[in-house]
Amino acid sequence: MYVDSKLTSFIAESTVRHGVLKMNRAQEIKQVAHQLMLEKGYSGFSYADIATVIGIQKASIHYHFPSKDNLVQSVLQDYRRSASDSLRKFEDTAANPRGKLENYFAYWADRLANEPTHICLCAMLASENSILPEEAQCEIQAHFEEMRKWIQSVLQEAQEQGMLFPSHLSLEAEAASILAVVHGGMLAARAYRDKQQFTMVTEALLHKIMRHQA
Amino acid sequence: MYVDSKLTSFIAESTVRHGVLKMNRAQEIKQVAHQLMLEKGYSGFSYADIATVIGIQKASIHYHFPSKDNLVQSVLQDYRRSASDSLRKFEDTAANPRGKLENYFAYWADRLANEPTHICLCAMLASENSILPEEAQCEIQAHFEEMRKWIQSVLQEAQEQGMLFPSHLSLEAEAASILAVVHGGMLAARAYRDKQQFTMVTEALLHKIMRHQA
DNA sequence: CGCAGTATACCTACTAGTAGGTAGATAGTC
DNA sequence: GACTATCTACCTACTAGTAGGTATACTGCG
């Protein structure tokens, strides 16, 4: 069934099989691959690992995703799409700019609470950057850029509402710092196996940057 | 290549005393392993890679370091030792607490300027935490802790000298935030292949936390 | 001094196991 | 009959690690 990875997401939603709503196999493979990449990194996970988890043969995965490069790119595209959706949710459920960032931080704090390996896929893969297929490197860079821009837009809004503490720094640098704290905090939470490492640094940052009210 | 390795071997053997020769080769192996880990990560580098770079056989590396676990732990121990030395240098060459942090940031900015993969070894390996040998995990955690404590002690000193901007946050949280920014900034510099990503976020942070003068 | 014993540092050649990837057969479905 | 999704069986290349051998150098003894 191999199709262009750009089209997979539209096709690979879910299908009804034998009267039971079952996840599309390609989707299942991507989900397991995502999980394994978070746990072991790009060069640490294998087709054999995925096959074992799902209970199929290695070759069956190659049918859906001819190469590892292909699979990883597809997983990253899915990830970025869901990340964009999340950003929209953070915006929709927040009363003010501060709430948007709080939603963002809380999202990851929740993930880390369940499992200390549940960090951002792009943050995870960024450290392996130099051995990643080029398309994957591009996706990661684009994700970082998208996140920084979103944070920057939130800061801009906060500034217009007078919520931002005065600073002579560019909003770009401020936004990049926030993203760096988020990623660094994830790394620390992972090293310590303790999500408190994440919440501590993100909450500290928020107090430094903006007020609770306009 | 055969002649070259024979020649260097001859020079080493004839100019260096017994016992030190082993240390030289072992040191060389550790150095190359460090480099390769930064480039490819723990599961991405192999004994064969090291052997090729140095120009010896795989088995010779096993002679010096029986197992990969063994080698990695040894590299991490060396790294932590040199990191401690660096901290002392940052202290000795700084006029005030701010200067100490500036030295710390400048050190990594310089490394990143030469090569975008030249980040902190522990930050690099932290993302692979769950597949690392246990001793390595301990070293990484201990390094993070040591760094956070050092930053915290610098902040303490700055506070006593009235250089710190007032904050109701704990110095522990402040120090952890700084470390997170450093690690997150390294990740960004790696993803963008641009050291400016690092300098931007560390400089922004410094402006937020402390004054230039007491 | 010369010689034996031992440690060092490397080699070639191998093991068992895993990596990503392929070919071709098979069974169910449209 | 074509298409889809899977299988078995295989490939080559590479993984960490081992066995056994070699040359050289240091060390203690007569």
Image: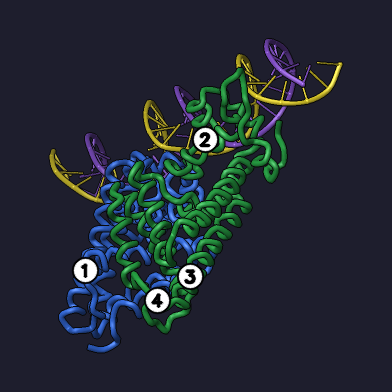
Chain colours: A green, B blue, C purple, D yellow
For label 1, the crowd category at 10 Å Cα-Cα, with few meaning under 14, some 14 to 19 and many 20 or more, is some
The kind of residue on which mark 1 rests is: Leu
- Check whether the beta carbons of the residues at disc 2 and disc 4 lie within 8 A of each other: no
Q: Which residue is mark 1?
A: B171
The kind of residue on which mark 3 rests is: Gln
Q: Is residue B127 above or below residue B133?
A: below
Which residue is found at the position 64% from the left and 38% from the top? A67
Eye-nearest disc, 3 or 4: 4
What separation in Å lies between label 3 and label 4 (alpha carbons)? 23 Å
Tell me the tag on residue A164. 4
Q: Which residue is mark 3?
A: B197
- Check whether the beta carbons of the residues at disc 3 and disc 4 lie within 8 A of each other: no
The kind of residue on which mark 4 rests is: Leu
What separation in Å lies between label 1 and label 2 (alpha carbons)? 43 Å
Q: Which residue is mark 2?
A: A46
- The picture quadrant where one finds residue B155 is bottom left
- Of the residues under marks 3 and 1, which one precedes in the sequence? 1
Q: Nearer the viewer, residue A4 or D8?
A: A4
